Amino acid sequence: VFVISDEVAHLRKVKTGLVVGDQIEIQSGLSAGDLVVSLGHQKLIDGSTVRIYDMPELPEPTQDSPAASAAANTGVGGGSN
């Protein structure tokens, strides 16, 4: 996946786990608060300069979501973005 830091895209390897619908558990490779590219990643390369426009507020995971389950099991997640 690509993680954005200081307007630069950084390629990061992740280990995936449980898949439920369109949600994928990330077991390792990301930290709470990492800003992950979810759209437009097809033309990115490691080190690409990016600009974020109109980023929406993200909801906190609910207790029954895979993200919340993964956070409870791995200690990741829960913080503000």
Image: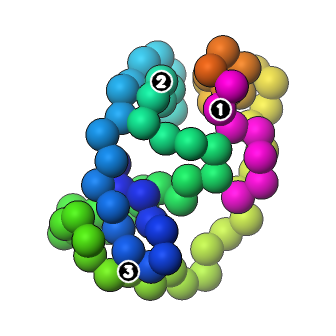
Q: In the figure, residue 72 lies in which quadrant? A: top right
Residue bounds of the magenta highlight: 75-81
The disc labelled 2 sits on which kind of residue?
Gln
Q: Which residue in the protein does label 2 denote?
A: 27
- Image coordinates for residue 27, horizontal then vertical, percent: 48, 24
Earlier-in-chain disc, 3 versus 2: 2
Earlier-in-chain disc, 1 versus 3: 3
Circle 3 crowding by C-alpha within 10 Å: few under 14, some 14–19, many from 20: few
Label the magenta part by its dominant secondary structure: loop
- Image coordinates for residue 37, horizontal then vertical, percent: 42, 60
The disc labelled 3 sits on which kind of residue?
Val
Q: Which residue in the protein does label 1 denote?
A: 76
Looking at the picture, tell me which residue is in the foreground, 28 or 20: 28
Circle 1 crowding by C-alpha within 10 Å: few under 14, some 14–19, many from 20: some
Q: Residue at x 19, y 66 (%)?
A: 45
Spatial CA distance of label 3 from label 2 is: 26 Å
Looking at the picture, tell me which residue is in the foreground, 7 or 42: 7
Q: Residue at x 77, y 54 (%)?
A: 80
Q: In the figure, residue 76 lies in which quadrant? A: top right
Can you see residue 65?
no
